[in-house]
Amino acid sequence: MEQTREAIAQNLAERLCWQAARRDDARVARRLYRKQVVDGVYRLDEGALLDDFFDFLQQLGVVGLLDEVQGTAVQREMVPFVQYLLLYSLKTLFGIESMNALPALLFSDEARMRLVGFNAHQARHGVCQRGAAKRQGPRVRGPICSDALADNIVKLNVRDLEAWFNGVIRALAKTGVFAAKVTGIVDATDLETTAQYKGCGQVTRKRKITDKRGKVHEIEVTVYGWKLIVLIEARTKIPWRQRWSRSRSTKRFPCGP
């Protein structure tokens, strides 16, 4: 089933409004009736939500930290790498599942594109006209194509990304998001690659396969890649620290605050 603009707008409202808040309409009505001061009044349309959210990121210093994240294999930079990061962050925030859906659900929205640094001309006509002569049919609106985002986001420098992630957590801690005492949950997952990835680790594991006759066999396979270890704060479910480690079976990697 294809996603709609209404569905991703609902994702945004739920993720930015209600995860860290408690809804109490009766209490709000009483305070307004008694002319008492309220913390704030926020519109629920996505434009206002994103404006407030990006302003919050600016105050935290998160956007400045993004400038330090670079792609390891970028030869020529037609689009600043920070804009790829912001676009992919919006994809995650809106809960857009498919890269191919980005032109229709995200890239064609000029207000959102201006928010991440593209001007109106770029949002309508693209940042360049490369391949325009070979194009068959009308151009899909948006500053870049979904393939450009996919091709560049995988070129992130892992250590820069780790430093940015942990920098965001430190910024959140300074604002008092976390309590004085926290309970941490450590979780790890494998990030598998091929053997060609520079600096990746390797581990030999046993896997069960079923042959054409239905018999189960156990074989040894070598897996390449990294292990992503995340420390999550139990109350808010906010990741507290991230560490990338080479994936090896003979060594455990610590993860601390």
Image (cartoon, rainbow, N blue to C red):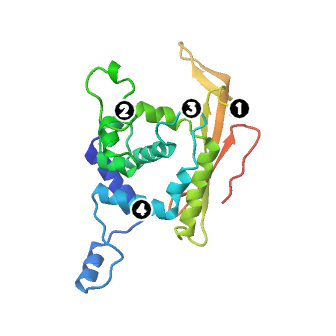
Question: Where 160 falls versus 236 (above or below)?
Answer: above
* Residue ID for mark 3: 75
The amino acid type found where label 2 is placed reads: Asn
Answer yes or no: do the residues labelled 4 and 1 have beta carbons within 8 Å? no
Picture disc at residue 100: 2
Picture disc at residue 55: 4
**Residue 129 shows in this picture:** yes
Q: Residues within 10 Å of mark 1 (few under 14, many from 20)?
A: some
The amino acid type found where label 1 is placed reads: Val
Q: Residues within 10 Å of mark 2 (few under 14, many from 20)?
A: few
**Residue 230 shows in this picture:** no
Residue at mark 4 to residue at mark 2: CA–CA distance: 29 Å
Q: Say which residue appears at 45% left-offset and 36% top-offset.
A: 149
**Farthest residue, direction top:** 213
Q: Secondary structure at mark 1?
A: strand
The amino acid type found where label 4 is placed reads: Asp
Q: Earlier in the sequence, mark 3 or mark 2?
A: 3
Question: Where 176 falls versus 135 (above or below)?
Answer: below
